[in-house]
Image: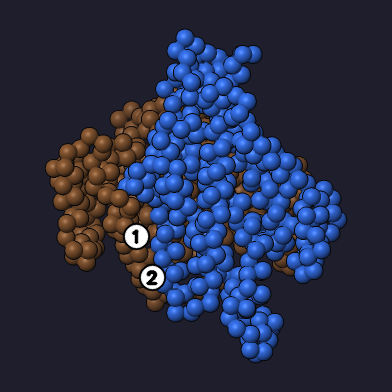
Chain colours: A blue, B brown
Amino acid sequence: MSNLDQETLMADAVLSQKEDPSLLTVMVRNRAIFWGGILLSLFALIAIFGPFFTVDPVALSPMTRLRPPSAAIWFGSDFLGRDVFARVIYGARISLVVGLAVAVISVIIGLFLGLVAGYVRPLDAVIMRTMDGLMSIPAILLAIALISLSGATLGTVIIAIMIPEIPRVVRLVRAVVLTVREEPYVEAAIAAGTRLPMILSRHILPNTIAPLIVQATYVCASAMLTESILGFLGAGIPPEIPSWGNIMSEGRTYFQISPWIIFFPGVALALTVLAVNIVGDGLRDTLDPRIARKM
Amino acid sequence: MYLYVIKRILATIPVMVIVALFVFLMLRLAPGDPAAVIAGDYATAEDVERIRAQLGLNDPILVQMGKWLAQLARGDLGTAIFSKLPVTTLIGQRLEPTLLLALSTITFTVLVAVPLGTLAAYKAGSWIDRLVMLFSVAGFSVPVFVLGYILIYVLSMQLKILPVQGYKSPFEYGLWQFARHMILPTLTLSVIYIALIARMTRASVQEVLQEDYVRTARAKGQSEFKILMRHALRNAAVPIVTVIGLGIALMIGGVVVTESVFNIPGLGRLVLDAVLARDYPVIQGLILFFSFVYILINLLIDLSYTLFDPRIKY
C-alpha cells in the first residue's frame, strides 16, 4: 500500500469519527483488516460448523494409536487413537469462545472502572493503585493461582484469564476520559447544565469506542494464547475437553515419535492469534491514527 | 535528586502492599471452599480441616490479614504444605537456573532487538522494515511452547546439533555444557521479548530521526552510523529501557512454560510442581516473589533514567 493510500485512510478514519459516513467502507479498504477478517471468519465458520462434519473428537480407537497423518486421518491420531483433526476442529470452538468472552467481559468491566476513575476524583487514586498492583502480578501465575483455588472449569478459566487483562483496559479508558473532559465542548456542555449521565453517554463514551475496539482485539489474542498455555501446563480447562492446549499437553509425552499431535493444534492456534493480531493492527491504524504514529 | 529517589522508593511500598492484599484476598474470596479444592478429590474431612488450619483460615479475617502482612514484612513467604519447608528455602534451591536463563534471555534480546529495531526505523518502509514488523507480529502470535518444540524438532532431533532437554549447572559441568543446554531455552523465551523490544525501538528511533538535531547532524556531515548511535539511539533510550523493564512480566510467564518444555529445574518448574501437588502456599509465595522482583526491577529502571538521559534531573 502506498503512503498516499495510507494517508487518505487515516484522513477517512478521522472524518468517520466526526461524521461517521461509513465505518465499514474504511475497514474493507484496509488490507490488514480485510485479509485478517477473512481468515478469522473462516476459522469462526470452521469452529461453528466444523464439528458437525468430523468424526467424534473423543471417540477412542485403540487399534489405530499414534498413526501419522494420512489420507484417511488427515492430522494423524493420538495415543488413544483419537482423531487429531476432529479434535483440532473442536478445539477452535474453545479457543474462540475463551478469546471472545475474555475480550468482551474485560472491556465492559474495564470501561466501567475507567469511567469511574476518570470522573470520580476521590476514587481515582484507589482504583489506579489497585490496578498498578494487579499489573505487577505476572498474568499466567495469577491465572494459575486463581484456577488452583477455584477448580478448573471453562468458567473459572475465563475469569482467571480475564482478571489480569482488566488493568490495561482501565488505564486506557481513564486516559481517554482525562483528555476528553478538558475539551471545550465538554466544558460547554457542563456550562449549559447538561447532567453527568448525558455528558458521559454523549461525549465521553463515543471517544472511548475506537481505542477500546483495538484493545479488545489484543486482549482476545492474548487470552487465546494464555488459555492454550494453561492447558499445556495442565492447569487449564479439564483434560477431557479437547482444547488446543489440552491436545498439545497430551502430545508432549509422544513428541519424539509423534510430533503431529503438537504440530497441528500449534499451527491452528498460531494462525488464529495471528489473524486476530493483524485485524487489531489494521483497526489501530484506521481507527486511531494517533496511536498508529506512536507504535 | 536524593529526595526524588527516596520518594520513588517509598512509592513502591503501597504497590507491594496492594499485591500482598490481593494475594491474601484471593484465597479468602475464592468461590467454594479453597481448603477442599487444595485437599483434592480423595481427601477426608480431617484432611480439609488440617489444611484449613494450616492456611490460617479459622481466625477472624482481620487477624488473618494482620498476621499475613507481619509475616511478609519479616521476609517470610509462608511454608509449603507437603515438604513443610519455608517457601524462601524452596526458592533459594531453584533460583540458579531461572536467574541464568533470565539473564541470558535479556542479554540476547537486547543484542538482537535493539539493532533490528534501529535498522527498521532507519530504513522505514523498506523490505528490512517490513520483515522486522512481520517478525514482531508473528512473535506475538506463536505460543512459547510450540516454538520450543519446533526448535527441538529441527535443531535437536533432525539436525542433532543441540541437546533436547535438561539443564547443566555451569558450576558443576563447566561453561560449555551449560551454554549448549541454554541455547534453545534462551531462543524460545526471547522471541516474544524480541518482538516487543524491536517494535518499541523502531517506533522511538523513528520519532527521534525526525528531530531537527538529526537534520543538523546530517548537514554538518556526520556519518550515518554516528547519527544513529550518538543522536538517535541515545535519545530514544528511555522508552526502550522502560519497555525492557515492562517486558519482564512477559518473560516471567514465559519462564514457567520454557522450563516445563526443556525440563529445567528452576522456579517455573517449582510453580508447576506446586500446582500438581496442590501446594497453594508455594504458588502464593512464588507469585509474591515474582511480583516483588518485577516491581523492584522497574524501580531500578526508573532510577536509571538519568544515566541514559542527563537532561532528566530529579
Disc 1 target residue? B22
Q: Is residue A172 left or right of residue A61?
A: right
In this rendering, would B56 be left or right of A56? Answer: left
Identity of the amino acid at label 1? Phe
If you read the primary sequence from the N terminus, does the residue marked by circle 1 or circle 2 appear first?
Answer: 2
| Residue B159 visible | no
Q: Which of B231 and B273 is in front in this view?
A: B273
Q: Name the residue under label 2.
A: B11
Give the image location of residue A249, x and y in percent. 44, 30
Q: Residues within 10 Å of mark 1 (few under 14, many from 20)?
A: some
- In the picture provided, is B265 more to the left or to the right than A68? left
From the top left corner, tell me how far across and down residue B296 is, in percent: 38, 59
Taking the spot 19% from the left edge, 50% from the top edge, the residue there is B52
Q: Which residue appears at 27% of the width and 49% of the height? A: B34
Amino acid type of the residue tagged 2 in the rendering:
Ala
The residue lying toward the viewer, choosing from B100 and B276, is B276
Residue situated furthest top in the rendering = A63
Which residue: 22% across, 66% down? Answer: B62
The image position of residue B226, as x and y in percent, is 67, 55
Q: Position of residue B56 (x, y in %)?
A: 18, 55
Res B223 → quadrant: bottom right
Rendered-image quadrant of the N terminus of chain B: bottom left
Q: What element carries label 1?
A: helix
